[in-house]
Image: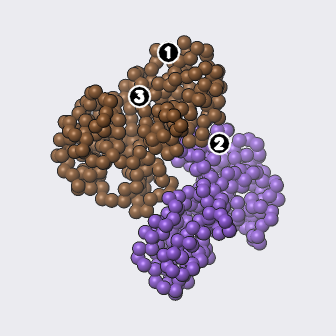
Chain colours: A purple, B brown
């Protein structure tokens, strides 16, 4: 069966997340409907990184297999059928056994903070407004502590479907994107649900002197969810890239 | 009378422009209503650069005079009363004779093009989608030709209220903002209505080989509006800064 990879971007503000939910506008729902219309057969997408309501994506990847070859115009057709807040920059035919989720080596997320005194009109629902104290050295120390293998039980909701809580963080750092925009980026083999937003909430506690750095390090060895910081707004979060063996 | 300068930013997508119009949401209308509520007296704003419906601002400036001193919390109050797409990053007390429009030495505008094959979901109503040919050398030659004093009659609607059509362009250039975003910036002592959008439309004709460069140069000596190119979408246009003597 012909198989395809979709590279996908979306502004998540007006979506109830990736996964299909009856009666709600979701990225998967809108894409599967458009694919069904173009290809004339029902399509089920496999996604690299399920995102929650409000979360954005610059480099989401999904795959699907169909009975009949897709026309070369598939990408253009999808972009004309979906809303302006959803785009498919690339459609690629892939090996029949390609699976966007299972084959992914790592995922990279970005969390954006708008640190201006007044929230920027251009960052509304695209960054968390954070006009508070933020010690970048402490935030960066937390990012460094994240690298390696840790138990992230404290950073995912207690009513979880996950069975394993160890994840390998390949890279984590803070950076200044522009004038008032600070950015946290983290890459890991895989993420627990809500993990980045809970990590950011806890790191911001450390960086604003409301939690000891040593306590953040302790949480990385496994703890109850209630011991870590709050989950931050989904609007600051972006799935930036999914990495596959031998390619990105 | 105490006089104040407001520094203003807005995402213009949901505004019918700067100027008050009955029954429409405008930047001036929303700000004057908020000012009236906070200050307890009617306020009339003088603005440096009137913007049309859909046009954005990163560095708009307006001024006003009132009977009573404004409270130090005025900026915070305004930001809480206006929508998330409108912000007042700074309120400054100024000399009683300060006039945001008359005292401005120059204005700087930016026009953003999204040159990706599929329009970016993050640039919807923030850039013009331009997946077509664009010879940057030709575009830059047009920018260079703009510098100096020219007659811009060809770049403003014929049913104009302007009486003088000469303007002095202090700076004009093209630049790459990031991956797929190209940016045209132009600074002049003042602009005719619709001037930047008509200039961009005409430069894009030159840069896509639909008009001779020499013809663009000819238009700068004065011509009918119909001889120049189309006016481009307001959503790509930003008022970036207003420059005052001895400060920006």
Chain ID of residue with mark 1: B
Element on which disc 3 rests: strand
In this figure, which residue is indicated by the disc labeled 1? B95
Q: Quadrant of residue B218?
A: top left
Establish whether labels 1 and 2 are both on one chain: no
For residue A10, side relative to residue B220 (left or right) = right
For residue B134, side relative to residue B124 (left or right) = left
Element on which disc 2 rests: loop
Asked if marks 3 and 1 touch (Cβ < 8 Å), the reply is no
| C-alpha gap between disc 3 and disc 1 | 16 Å
Q: Toward the viewer: B43 or B124?
A: B43
Q: Up-down: is B87 above or below A50? A: above
For residue B1, side relative to residue B102 (left or right) = right
Establish whether labels 3 and 1 are both on one chain: yes
Q: Quadrant of residue A64?
A: bottom right
In this figure, which residue is indicated by the disc labeled 2? A130
Res B243 label:
3
Taking the spot 59% from the left edge, 65% from the top edge, the residue there is A27
Chain ID of residue with mark 3: B
| C-alpha gap between disc 1 and disc 2 | 33 Å
Disc nearer the start of the sequence (3/1)? 1
Estimate how packed mark 1 is, as few (under 14), some (14 to 19) or many (20 or more) residues with alpha carbons within 10 Å. Answer: few
Q: Toward the viewer: A48 or A172?
A: A48
- In this view of the protein, can residue A76 be seen by the observer? yes
How far across and down, in percent of the image, does residue B82 sit? Answer: 60, 36
């Amino acid at each position: 069966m012909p198989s395809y990879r979709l590279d996908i971007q979306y502004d998540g503000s007006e979506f109830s997340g990736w996964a299909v939910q009856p009666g709600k506008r979701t990225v998967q729902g809108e894409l599967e409907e458009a694919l069904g219309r173009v290809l004339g057969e029902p399509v089920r997408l496999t996604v690299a990184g399920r995102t929650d309501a409000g979360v954005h994506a610059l480099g989401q990847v999904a795959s699907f297999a169909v009975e009949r070859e897709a026309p070369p115009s598939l990408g253009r057709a999808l972009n004309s059928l979906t809303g302006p807040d959803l785009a498919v920059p690339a459609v690629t035919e892939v090996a029949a056994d390609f699976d966007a989720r299972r084959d992914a080596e790592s995922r990279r997320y970005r969390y954006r903070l708008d640190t201006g005194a007044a929230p920027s009109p251009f960052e509304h629902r695209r960054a968390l407004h954070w006009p508070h104290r933020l010690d970048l050295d402490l935030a960066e120390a937390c990012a460094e502590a994240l690298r390696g293998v840790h138990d992230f039980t404290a950073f995912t909701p207690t009513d979880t479907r996950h069975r394993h809580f160890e994840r390998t963080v390949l890279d984590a750092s803070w950076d200044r994107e522009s004038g008032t925009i600070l950015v946290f980026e983290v890459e890991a083999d895989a993420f627990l649900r809500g993990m980045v937003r809970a990590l950011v909430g806890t790191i911001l506690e450390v960086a604003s002197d409301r939690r000891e750095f040593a306590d953040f390090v302790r949480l990385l060895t496994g703890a109850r969810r209630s011991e870590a910081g709050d989950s931050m707004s989904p609007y600051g979060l972006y799935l930036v890239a999914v990495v596959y063996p031998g390619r990105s």
